[in-house]
Image: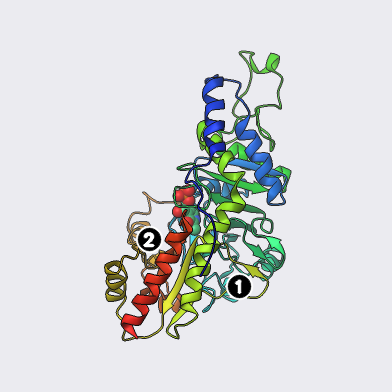
Amino acid sequence: MCKATSIPRVSAKARKYVNEVLDFGFHNCSSPGIGARLERQFAERFGCRFGILHANGTATMHSALLAADVGVGDEVIVPPFTVFSTAAVALHAGAVPVFADVDPDTWTISPDDIRRKITSRTKAIIPVSIGGLAADMDPIMELATQHGLTVIEDNAQCFLGYYKGRVVGSMGHFASFSFQASKHMTCGDGGILICDDEELATAARKAAVLGFSTLSARPGDVVVAEELRCQPTFQRHTHFGYNYRLPEIAAAVALGEFERLDELVEMRKHSAACLAEVVADCDWLVPQKTPDEYVHSYWTYIARIAREEIDWTAFRRKFGELGGDGFYGAYLPVYREPILPKLSDAARNQPQRYPQFAGIMPDYHQVRCPTWEAIPPRIIQLKTNHFDPADAQRQADILADTIRAFS
Ligand SMILES: Cc1ncc(COP(=O)(O)O)c(C=O)c1O
């Protein structure tokens, strides 16, 4: 039996900081500085000097690619087991996603397959901490150093995971986190990009906020004195950038949630531990492997139904009938999402419409990641966001009953 205490869905601190923002009111060139506080504290917790808040955890990775000068003609290596955003940002930057297969047990991107996929066009790698488990970062960083590539950790699903003693988010050139509603810490929607290199962080902030000349790696609009900025001849836009600002009211919620991040992560780990106890007694449910020296942060608890005769849909139906939360299967391998083969066709048939992809976009109809392709039809992704630990135990008991029904 797993033990823990119940926690509220939204923290009292989040409410307090929201009120601070509301009491301050909205002014054009000043704020209560909550966003800046979150940027500093978040970056520090993850061992980096700079944090850049964004509207979501997709925009973060787009800014990182732009800062790393990834664009037309370039390739970005990504895994097939991820949310579409990881591949989409390559396309947003004008580059193309190239898929490297996964490790058969951890289901994170395989460094060996990354090595095979590197070409003279490769500019970046986006390893994903899928489900809350880090990719094998040491060999990935070695490959990046050898080939001069930028590594962006996609940690949308991983807060306070560890890899060989290092916190996940402290190893790549950039690390991206999402505050979308399902994530460990949320403000509804939002994200943060962290980075330890001042030049890259400056470029990312400019990419995220309209290329204002007044921005630096540090929070706030500080590098040019107001007497100069107010002049009619002042040159404001020196770089190309999007507008990915996070509203301060959302930053206020995120700061409150960040200040209880340990508790939020513990809640997920507690739910996962309840499920793991049940799965350990079943010889045909195989969980995502957590290698020694890794700490999983369990955004979800993923397992594979290893007995072929058990039908995925029947298993899900039974779990639901017994009172189980709905669970998701794996996402389609990203290159199987209809838009990617459609884009390959468009790049081939309408080169004038998609000149950036003409001649270099892979034919996604033909792309294969054989290790991963065998696994998704058998995957279950169980919820771990039980704010009341009694719910976590109940779900684990229901899983045990479901397993018994199929044994
Ligand atoms: C692995 C992964 N990458 C990227 C994202 C994108 O985050 P957001 O929804 O904040 O843009 C998500 C969130 O769904 C995700 O799970």
The percent position of residue 356, horizontal first and vertical second, equals: 46, 52
Amino acid at pointer 2: Leu
Residue 128 appears in view = no
* Mark 2–mark 1 distance (CA, rounded to whole Å): 24 Å
Q: Quadrant of residue 216?
A: top right
Who is closer to the viewer here, 35 or 239?
Answer: 35
The percent position of residue 222, horizontal first and vertical second, equals: 69, 26
- Mark 1 surroundings: few (<14), some (14-19) or many (≥20) residues within 10 A: many
**The residue tagged with tag 2: helix, strand or loop?**
helix
- Mark 2 surroundings: few (<14), some (14-19) or many (≥20) residues within 10 A: many
Question: Would the CB of label 1 be found within 8 Å of ligand 1?
Answer: no
The vertical placement of 88 against 366, above or below, is above
The circle drawn on residue 95 is none
The circle drawn on residue 111 is 1
Residue 186 appears in view = yes
**Colouring mode (rainbow / by chain / secondary structure / one colour):** rainbow
The percent position of residue 18, horizontal first and vertical second, equals: 52, 31
The vertical placement of 211 against 118, above or below, is above
316 vs 189, left or right, is left
Mark 2 vs 1, N-terminal side: 1
**The residue tagged with tag 1: helix, strand or loop?**
helix
Who is closer to the viewer here, 160 or 262?
Answer: 262
Mark 2 = which residue? Answer: 340
